[in-house]
Amino acid sequence: MSSNIETVLQEKRVFPPAPAFVKQANISGMDAYRKLVAEAERDFEGFWARLARENLLWSKPFTKVLDESKAPFFRWFYDGELNASYNCLDKHLKTQPDKTAIIFEADDGKVTKITYQQLYHEVCRFANALKAKGIKKGDRVLIYMPMSIQAVVAMQACARIAATHSVVFGGFSAKSVQERIIDAGAIAVITADGQFRGGKEIPLKPVVDEALGMGGCEAIKNVIVYKRSGSKVPMQAGRDAWWDDAVKGQADTCEPTFVNAEHPLFILYTSGSTGKPKGIQHSTGGYLLWCALTMKWVFDNKPSDVFWCTADVGWVTGHSYIVYGPPWAQPRWCSKASRSIRTPGGSGRRSRITRSTCSTPRRPRSAR
């Protein structure tokens, strides 16, 4: 047998972008790219310090860039303080409060739009509701929600009061929810009665009840339920509350809790398909800067764009490019309840996307 294998997949053609497109890009051509690379190679700490100061809002400016004393446990901007929700929402209130922030298309095709100011007030009301339940800085909150504006609100509200959220994909089983509640040390769950995917209703609150009944979840004192499907679900007195009841009477402003840049913003678990799910902790400052710069550099996003992300908020792509990256970059961002998109040539409607799209693969319900 010959050891030489003929390769026919070599592609050497180059397709340069039009000069006008290069000129308007956030990184305008290879010279600009090489300039960034040279700056990073010359002084990488100074490089990241400049970007962190230019792109993030700090309540307490950092003076230390990188702590390598306990490598590989590195700490970035570790004496500075900020808040992720404040960076995403408050900065728009004076300049563009009425600009559309989210365009959400439900499974049945219904489209809902919400402005930055409306989103800010929804986040603040829910943040105040969480505080009224005794949830505070450093507490862990598990989120098991359908794709919805309310999922964004729940995550941003946790960030606003410095509670660490852990989102579980809405297709995972009760056992998966139970394992993550125990491992994260969660004290509260935010969920919905159910969700719709591909026209079918999938229960969520019954799954949470099953998970809590498996044992080991005694730390859960509050379960807040968003009414999405309208199905009748059991509600345990003293523990369970409907979303609308929780936010009723709450103020629509909430001062952000500023935290150290290394404060854990969220914990996200691997699917567990190759073993026990592993929780990955993301800190506030470095993660938020990465979201901002990838929106700016990778997607070349502009404030006038419509940015569409097909990922579920249960995956890190959904965290980065639905919840935290787009509100920093200021486009209108789109999300769908189901990722079965009808395309031209098929039946139903056509989805129009401008400039930027990102996605992650969908995992089956049976995945852990």
Image (spheres, rainbow, N blue to C red):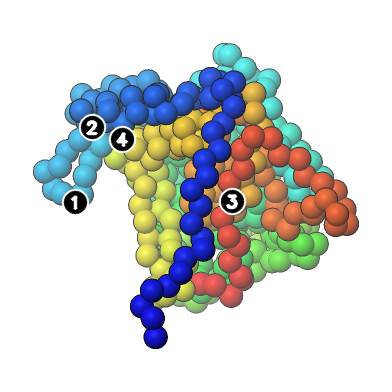
**Tag in front: 1 or 2:** 2
Mark 2, secondary structure of its residue: helix
**Tag in front: 2 or 3:** 2
Give the mark nearest the N terminus, 4 or 2: 2
> Can you tell which mark lies on residue 72?
1
Give the mark nearest the N terminus, 3 or 4: 4
Spatial CA span between label 1 and label 4? 17 Å
Horizontal arrangement in the rendering, residue 123 relative to residue 85 (left or right): right
Task: Identify the residue at image location x=71%, y=39%.
Answer: 353
In this view, 342 is above or below 50: below
- Residue type for callout 1: Pro
Q: Nearer the viewer, residue 60 or 231?
A: 60
| Quarter that holds the N terminus | bottom left
Label 2: which residue?
41
In this view, 260 is above or below 63: below
Mark 1, secondary structure of its residue: loop
Label 3: which residue?
359
Where residue 292 appears, as percent x and y from the top left, is 45, 32
Q: Residue furthest left?
A: 69
Q: Residues within 10 Å of mark 2 (few under 14, many from 20)?
A: few
Where residue 55 appears, as percent x and y from the top left, is 41, 24
Spatial CA span between label 1 and label 3? 30 Å
Horizontal arrangement in the rendering, residue 240 relative to residue 266 (left or right): right
